Amino acid sequence: MTVVLGYDESPGAVRALHVAIEVSAAFDELLVLVYGAAAPGSLGEEYAAHRDAVREAGRATLSHAVAVADEAGVRTRVEVIDQKPAQALIEAAMRHSARCIVVGSWGESPLRGALLGSTPHKLLHLARTPVLCVPTEP
């Protein structure tokens, strides 16, 4: 089994990284770090350049999380997936038979999350894998 973490360097994601490392270490499991890199648009040279830039930003972001996990002695795998974050996390969790998906929240209200379609809100309603939603610190 594995632990899947959605990571984007937001305050909630930084805190979720530490929780995901604790869970991975406790069960001696691989931590799969996921960045949903769906670029807006769908065609043309401009789209391809934007997609490549989003992928590169995702790899750079995840490299910071890998460094933190390495310090804690937790094995990692990095996945930059060309989908929106919630769908990328669901897909990765299914492929890796994940124990859980860990994701940070921005501290937004449940109503705002429902209206805006936040990643944690989508995961709680769509994922078949247990979701651990980590709030930002006060």
Image: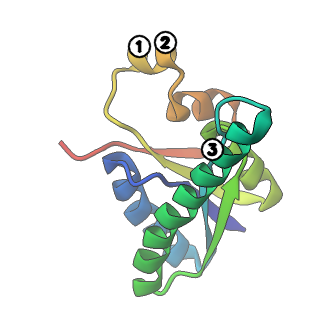
Name the image quarter holding residue 136.
Answer: top left
Which residue type carries mark 2? Leu
Which residue type carries mark 3? His
Q: Is residue 43 rendered to the left or right of residue 34?
A: right
Q: Earlier in the sequence, mark 2 or mark 3?
A: 3
Q: Which mark is residue 115?
A: 2
Q: Is residue 12 above or below residue 78?
A: above
* Circle 3: element type: helix
* Circle 2: element type: helix
Mark 3 and mark 1: Cα distance apart in space = 31 Å
Residue 83, image x, y percentages: 71, 41
- In the displayed orientation, state which residue is furthest to the front: 45
Give the residue pinned by disc 1. 111
Q: Which mark is residue 97?
A: none
Q: Is residue 1 rendered to the left or right of residue 113?
A: right
Quadrant containing the C terminus in the rendered view = top left
Which of the two marks, 2 or 1, is nearer to us in this view?
2
Residue 69, image x, y percentages: 46, 77
Q: Earlier in the sequence, mark 3 or mark 1?
A: 3
Residue 112, image x, y percentages: 40, 16
* Circle 1: element type: helix
Q: Which mark is residue 50?
A: 3
Residue 27 visible in image:
yes
Mark 2 and mark 3: Cα distance apart in space = 27 Å
Which residue type carries mark 1? Leu
Q: Is residue 119 above or below residue 66?
A: above
Who's the residue at 70% across and 38% down the image? 47
- In the displayed orientation, state which residue is furthest to the left: 138
